[in-house]
Image: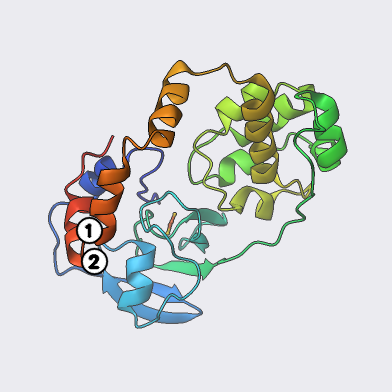
């Protein structure tokens, strides 16, 4: 039995991917062990709220970007523990749900200036990476369809640019590290690689330099002042009317 999910695409496309026709059809999902009838087109997050629960942790952007809504679930007649983001995974009849609003992880403290963009940085900060047994559970757990194991292997080789590229769509939901038998903290390794890349490997960007100079010279001051003077409603209207890349 499959399930629908919307991953790795811009917000507009995600919204377009939600079924255009909303029916009265209901399905049964199990939330904290209790059966609830919910709309068949609901996301897991929508179903939890429809069932009367208030989500006070484990929700942020509601569009698949912030990674706050890590969920595991089972489907009837299926032995697999499945993973997903509650805000972009649609319900399936008979689904049994559990939410993980926070997945604890050891967070090493490092000075990015003192690290070099090579394997020694990984060895110093995340020695757990070298415990990887290449089981691929991380990749199979990823709701963004990221090749997580591949970037862990790249980290073992010290290929910082490859880690950065392969982990680009990571939303740090933590589901990979929740399932990892070697207890690697993959999203934090990816974050280190991005920081190393940004600090030591990134080429100078003429466009960025130009934009920073424009900001510093006050080119946007009038527009900022206008935004600061607007009401919440007007700001909201402006926000939702914007062009989304
Ligand atoms: S609430 Fe942000 S990814 Fe689901």
Please name the residue shown 21% across and 61% down the image: 230
Q: Quadrant of the C terminus?
A: top left
Residue 117, position in %: x, y?
75, 24
Nearest the eye: 30 or 209: 209
| Total labels drawn | 2
Residue 75, position in %: x, y?
46, 61
Asked which quadrant contains residue 121, the reply is top right
Q: Label for residue 158?
A: none
Task: Quote the CA–CA distance across marks 2 and 1.
Answer: 5 Å
Q: Callout 1 environment at 10 Å: few (<14), some (14 to 19), or many (20+)?
A: some
Please name the residue shown 32% across and 68% down the image: 46
Q: Which residue is mark 2?
A: 232
- Distance from mark 1 CB to nearest ligand 1 atom below 8 Å: no
What element does badge 1 sit on? helix
Residue 229, position in %: x, y?
24, 60
Work out whether 152 lies above or below 137. Answer: above
Left or right of 245 on screen, residue 167: right
Asked which quadrant contains residue 203, the reply is top right
Q: Callout 2 environment at 10 Å: few (<14), some (14 to 19), or many (20+)?
A: few
Mark yes or no: residue 156 visible: yes
Left or right of 204 on screen, residue 149: right
What element does badge 2 sit on? helix
Q: Quadrant of ligand 1?
A: bottom left
Nearest the eye: 40 or 105: 105
Nearest the eye: 227 or 103: 227
Work out whether 94 lies above or below 142. Answer: below
Mark yes or no: residue 150 visible: no
Q: Which residue is mark 1?
A: 235
Residue 3, position in %: x, y?
38, 51
Please name the residue shown 52% across and 46% down the image: 171
Q: Are marks 2 and 1 in contact (CB under 8 Å)?
A: yes
């Amino acid at each position: 039995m499959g399930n629908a999910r919307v991953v790795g695409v811009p917000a507009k496309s995600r919204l377009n991917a939600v079924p255009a026709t909303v029916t009265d059809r209901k399905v049964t999902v199990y939330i904290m062990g209790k059966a609830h009838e919910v709309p068949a087109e609901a996301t897991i997050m929508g179903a939890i709220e429809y069932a009367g629960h208030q989500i006070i942790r484990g929700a942020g952007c509601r569009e698949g970007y912030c990674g706050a809504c890590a969920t595991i679930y089972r489907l009837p007649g299926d032995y697999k523990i499945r993973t997903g983001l509650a805000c972009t995974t649609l319900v399936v009849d008979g689904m049994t749900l559990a939410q993980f609003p926070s997945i604890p992880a050891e967070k090493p403290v490092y000075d990015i200036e003192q690290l070099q963009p090579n394997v020694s940085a990984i060895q110093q900060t995340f020695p757990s990476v070298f415990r990887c047994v290449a089981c691929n559970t991380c990749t199979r757990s990823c709701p963004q369809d990221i090749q997580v194991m591949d970037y862990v292997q790249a980290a073992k080789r010290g290929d910082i640019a490859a880690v950065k590229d392969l982990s680009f769509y990571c939303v740090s939901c933590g589901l990979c590290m929740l399932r990892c038998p070697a207890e690697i903290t993959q999203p934090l390794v990816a974050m280190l690689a991005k920081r190393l890349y940004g600090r030591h490997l990134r080429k100078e960007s003429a466009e960025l330099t130009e934009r920073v100079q424009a900001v510093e010279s006050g080119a946007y001051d009038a527009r900022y002042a206008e935004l600061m003077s607007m009401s919440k409603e007007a700001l909201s209207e402006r926000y939702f009317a914007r062009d989304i890349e």
